[in-house]
Image: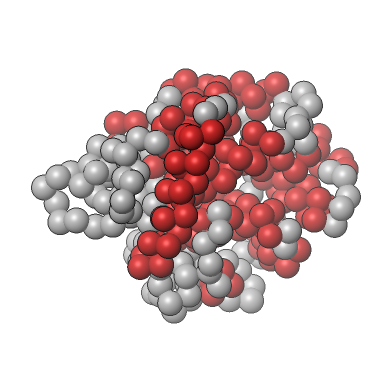
Amino acid sequence: MKLLSVIDVKSKAALYLRLVTRQQDEHGFIHSDECDSLLFTCLAACAGMEVDIWKAYDGQQWHRRPLDQAPCCPDHSKSSISRDMLLGVMWLAFARNDLALIDSVLRQMNKVVMGKWVGAIGLSRVIPTPGLYATARILRRRILHKGPGIWRFVPAADNRHASGYQGHLKALHIALRSVCVGKLTKLNKKTLECLYKRNYMNPLFAALAAGPAECIGILRQTTFWPDTHLPTTRERGPAWLPERDLHEYTGNPYTPVKFHSGMDFNFTLWITILWASSKFTQ
């Protein structure tokens, strides 16, 4: 990986971090008018964006966006929260080494598992998989400077087909489990390679399966991440590129210009550096 390429993308990440303040709400959330706000805001915060993330927590459970926004469910989403939102909070707990954050996630997961959940329609979106629950437990132990314990024996993911946001969720989960335990299992490695093979232009998949050079090459494409301003809807469609399939990447030059946050760039660069510096066993 060329040093100049790394300097280029780090400079762009710094620019985006300055410009994103125009896209944040009063609490620091991005996309707070949409129903994936908690996930994207948590990931952006991992990469240094300032936010009061607790504005989406009511003392008992997390919500898809800040509490001063109208609830997403049932008008705009089939559930008041989902697994990928909670995974975003888990990533932020990892980045901040924050015990309170991971404890809040585990309390919410425990309510679902024990049948005490009352806040969601479409319960299947909320029920944590055994692997995700185990990863939350492992992360808590890591923050407390403990080993993964028996939870390491619960697989993080399987190698079944996943695309779009489900592929994004699977990649994020495998990455978090791997950096928490310091091990990339053969099954998880194969799953990441399959995701990358299906979408070779996904920078997150490239970072985790092909390496930093391939990821940096994608991040340097100004079609998706311009050098002088935040990406817009005219340049590319999705607000968060890594969670979409390749055929969705194209922008629409005929629509009114709407700026994206650009924080998918910053988070992907952050996780690329984290992943490249991790020492994994198999």
Q: How many marks?
A: 0
User: Would residue 152 be found to the left or right of residue 71 on screen?
Assistant: right
Kindly identify the residue that appears in the image at 58 percent across and 55 percent down. 46
Kindly identify the residue that appears in the image at 69 percent across and 53 percent down. 94
Determine whether 15 is above or below 159 in the image. Answer: below
Q: Quadrant of the N terminus?
A: top right
Give the image's coloring scheme. secondary structure
Q: Quadrant of residue 114?
A: bottom right
Nearer to me, 96 or 71: 96
Where is residue 181 drawn, in percent x and y? 78, 39
Where is residue 26 drawn, in percent x and y? 43, 77
Determine whether 28 is above or below 43 in the image. Answer: below
Where is residue 117 drawn, in percent x and y? 62, 64
Judged from this view, the residue extending furthest toward the front is 4
Where is residue 97 drawn, in percent x and y? 73, 58
Nearer to me, 93 or 96: 96
Kindly identify the residue that appears in the image at 57 percent across and 38 percent down. 272
User: Would residue 282 be found to the left or right of residue 12 on screen?
Assistant: right
Is residue 122 visible to us here? no
Nearer to me, 265 or 154: 265
Nearer to me, 61 or 206: 206
Is residue 71 visible to us here? yes
Kindly identify the residue that appears in the image at 15 percent across and 56 percent down. 256
Q: Quadrant of the C terminus?
A: top right
